[in-house]
Amino acid sequence: MSSEGIEMAVSLYSFTQRFVDRDAYHVEDMFRTLRQLGVRQFEIVGAQVFDQYPRPRAAEVDRVLGAAQAHGCVPFSYGGYIDSGRVSGHTPTDEDVILDLTADLMTARDLGCRYLRAGHIPEHLLEPAAQLAENYDISIGIEVHAPSRPSDEDIQRLLSRYEDIGSARLGFVPDFGCFIERPAQPAIQRLLAMGARQDLLDYVIANRHSGVSELQMWDDVRARGGGNAERAAIAEFFGFLSFGPADLDGFRTLLPWSLYFHSKFYHVGEDLTDQQIPLGKLLTDIVASGFEGVLMSEYEGHAFHLDDAEEQVARHLQLERRILSSIV
Amino acid sequence: MPTTYMKLPYEDRVLRPDALRPLRLSSGIVGFTLDVRLNYYRGLPLSAVEALQLSVDGIRIPDHLVLTGLREKIFPLSQVRLAFTEHWPVKGILHLAVYNGGLDPGPHQVDLTLHLRNVSMQFAPGVWGMIDGSASRELVLVEAA
């Protein structure tokens, strides 16, 4: 086993808090930080950074490329969406999906990215998607993101389709947010600051896996006196902050088809530990699979309104390096 | 069960302290303008706006008095849902021009209901994730710089 072929990269999405909050903060500032962190490769999310989406103006692409070059940074992947709900009242068609996929591939090519991280592509469109990817010389990774888990039926069906199609242009981008084992402390603190009651948060956490649906939980908590803050808590704990035993067996099934990894994290302590995500186990499995490629650090502190990405990303990179160097 | 309700912690930026201004034309003050920003982490098509309702000092502003502006384009509120080629960037401002005759100088309680469709998150045919971009704030009517 060797971790020598694994490279560190950073998603610019990690700087969401400052980007959204400060008018003047933009990609130039992000690349300056990447250079300070000693990281060259990055992912950029078009719908966040560009004023025009799904097709940014050429000047916007030029701005990213110019700023990246000035700081010695190189585009690695482009974060796209399939915004099939763009037209109000319209039932999305295959044409809508292909249009957005094409737009994102065009932009990824404009940026010089090797990968497009795409949203949901219906199974029957995977073969045409592979052909489009070939046409644009860009590989498409479908993200496996919380609240999905690798063992979920739809994810395993997707894996099976990949095997049937057999195109190296298609694969997964597993997001480590799928493996949250317990709620992050900053999440609890933020919800308390919003006015949530500690006893109701404890109740939601204790009963998250009791078999009730998000809606049933909300009805229950509302009856106990919960309001908007508790409603937000339920939405998060059933959604992108879903937690539970990490699905490592499922994760291992995705490894042969993983193009790169979203090394998502919510908080790394001063002692360089991540209490939410079993990073050591995940990286051990990745190395054992023989994977060579990129770990894309992605900080989600904006979910808790925290403007500490520089410190957190630095810690996360340090933690990853420490884990990787310990894997023999 | 996927998330069907999302409210990110950027509510304070939806209506910034300087968001409310008089709308002054050649004939004098004809109403007021309000700058609205997204409480989200990415931009959205303008057509994602499913509900936009405005109240000032507890009184609902009739929709037909509101003209929305995004960059150089303007839409009556009733046509915002059709503007699917217009991208509302996450740093961008939706300008509301309200032709109600104007507001008195000083503080006003502004309540904005803003519900947006999460255009990339469909749970079932016709059922989309929703983003609550609403905000309430006491704003002081300020003159444009």
Image (cartoon, coloured by chain):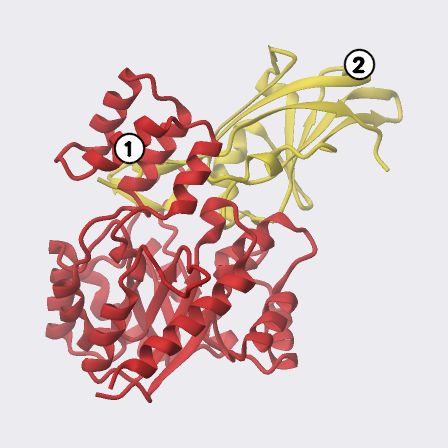
Quarter of the C terminus of chain B within the rendering:
top right
| Residue B2 relative to residue A109: left or right | left
Relative to the observer, which residue lies in front, B9 or B100? B9
Q: Quadrant of the N terminus of chain B?
A: top left
Looking at the rendered structure, the secondary structure element under dot 2 is loop
Looking at the image, which residue is at 37% across and 81% down? Answer: A137
Chain under numbered label 1: A
Q: In this view, does A148 lie to the left or right of A49?
A: left
Q: Which chain carries label 2?
A: B
Is residue A44 visible in the rendered image? The answer is: no
User: What colour is chain A?
Assistant: red
Task: Write down which chain is painted yellow.
Answer: B
Please state the horizontal and vertical placement of residue B140, each as a whole percent of the image.
Answer: 76, 23
Q: Name the residue under label 1.
A: A202
Q: Please identify the quarter of the rendering in which residue A1 is found.
A: bottom left
Question: Does residue A321 show up?
Answer: yes
Q: Where is residue A310 in the image (x, y as percent from the top left)?
A: 55, 64
User: Residue A101 got which mark?
Assistant: none
Amino acid at circle 2: Asp
Which quadrant holds residue B95?
top right
Q: What residue type is labelled 1?
A: Asp
* Residue at disc 1, secondary structure: helix
Disc 2 residue crowd, few under 14, some 14–19, many 20+, Cα 10 Å: few
* Mark 1 crowdedness (10 Å alpha carbons): few <14, some 14-19, many ≥20: few
Residue at 58% across, 50% down? A20
The residue indicated by pointer 2 is B104
Residue at 82% x, 17% y is B105
Foreground residue, A53 or A299? A299
Name the foreground residue: A250 vs A244.
A244
**Cα distance in 3D space between marks 2 and 1:** 47 Å
